[in-house]
Each structure stands twice: as C-alpha cells, then as structure tokens.
Amino acid sequence: MGQGFTPVLPTGNKAQLKPELPLTSINEIQASLLTYLQDIPDPRVSRTQKHLLTDILVIAILAVIAGAEGWEDIENYGLSKQSWLSEFLELPNGIPSDDTFRRVFERINPEALAKVLSQWLPHLSDDGTIERVGNTPCKDIPDKNSPEKYFRSIWVKVN
C-alpha cells in the first residue's frame, strides 16, 4: 500500500478505459473507483471548489463502509486516515470539513452516484457477480441530510 497508485486515465473516452475484471490489488481497486467516480457531474460552482469531487466521494464511501454514521464521522475518518488517503487522493486542501461533505451530498445527483457505484462494484468480484439484495427506503432516516440517505443498498458477492 506504500506506493498508492498511478492514475490510469489519460483525458479522453473513459468508457473504453474502464478496468477489466477481476481487480487483483488494492491499487487497482483504488484506481478503478477513482476512474468511475470521475463520471459523476460536479454540482458545485467552480470558484468555490477547494476539494476535488472525487476526493470527497472516495472519503465518504470508505468512511460509510467503515461505519460512519454522520458527516462529522466522515470528516473524522478522513482526518484519522489522511496519510493513507494522501497516497491515492490529491487532497489539495487536506480533508474536507463535515459541512463540505454535507453540502456536496445535498447537491449531488444520487441517481448518478448509484449508477456509478453499481457499475464499479462488480469489479470487486472475480467474476463480476455482486448483486443488490436489499434497499431500505430513505424515509426511515430521521435526518434527510444524513449520509445513510445515499448508501442504503445491501450488496453481496454471489458465490
């Protein structure tokens, strides 16, 4: 893990450059996640962007997988893992604040994020067989701005 990864994409047609199955190393997984997340439109005003959208999304995804339950948890995860995250994320202004995570996720298109994640997840399996087996409606989440609003599906690897 000490080397991070080298970006795999030149500018150009991303659809032809998606990684092949299976991904065999953490570096390939990191690179492929960043590749897919680049397809999500950034809803922010250019002049206000201190952090890269891909950095924000990767930190949030990893934090939620690790058990984060709110925006402060996501920020704290990023701060506690900053040296590791900096091996494969750019982090031009360090770790975003909890308010930055909240504001970005309030504006991001959840369908676009879900589509990208559903395209990326099969790359974690040897044969691409990861299926969605459940989805809890967001109405049971008291705080509609909670990160759980965006990460409620359950995925399993099919053996």
Image: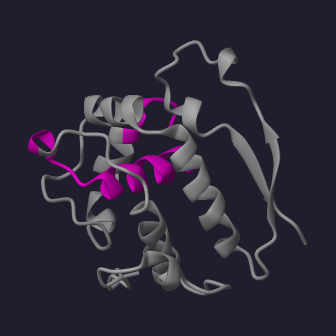
Question: 27 and 83: which one is in front?
Answer: 27
Q: Residue at point 46% right, 73% down?
A: 30
Q: Residue at point 46% right, 22% down?
A: 145
Magenta part of the chain? 47-74
On the rendered structure, is 128 left or right of 75? right
Question: 17 and 53: which one is in front?
Answer: 17
121, above or below 99, in the image: below
Q: What x and y, as percent, mark residue 40?
A: 42, 54
61 magenta-colored: yes
* Whether residue 72 can be seen here: no
Q: What x and y, as percent, mark residue 62?
A: 49, 54
Q: Quadrant of residue 141?
A: top right
Q: Predominant secondary structure in magenta?
A: helix
Question: 7 and 15: which one is in front?
Answer: 15
Q: Residue at point 79% right, 81% down?
A: 127
Q: Residue furthest right?
A: 159
57 magenta-colored: yes
42, above or below 92, in the image: above
Specify how the rendered protein is coloured. one colour
Q: What x and y, as percent, mark residue 105?
A: 40, 35
Quarter of the image with the C terminus in it = bottom right
147, above or below 63, in the image: above
* Whether residue 77 can be seen here: yes
On the rendered structure, is 53 left or right of 143? left
Q: Residue at point 14% right, 59% down?
A: 92
Q: Quadrant of residue 47?
A: top left
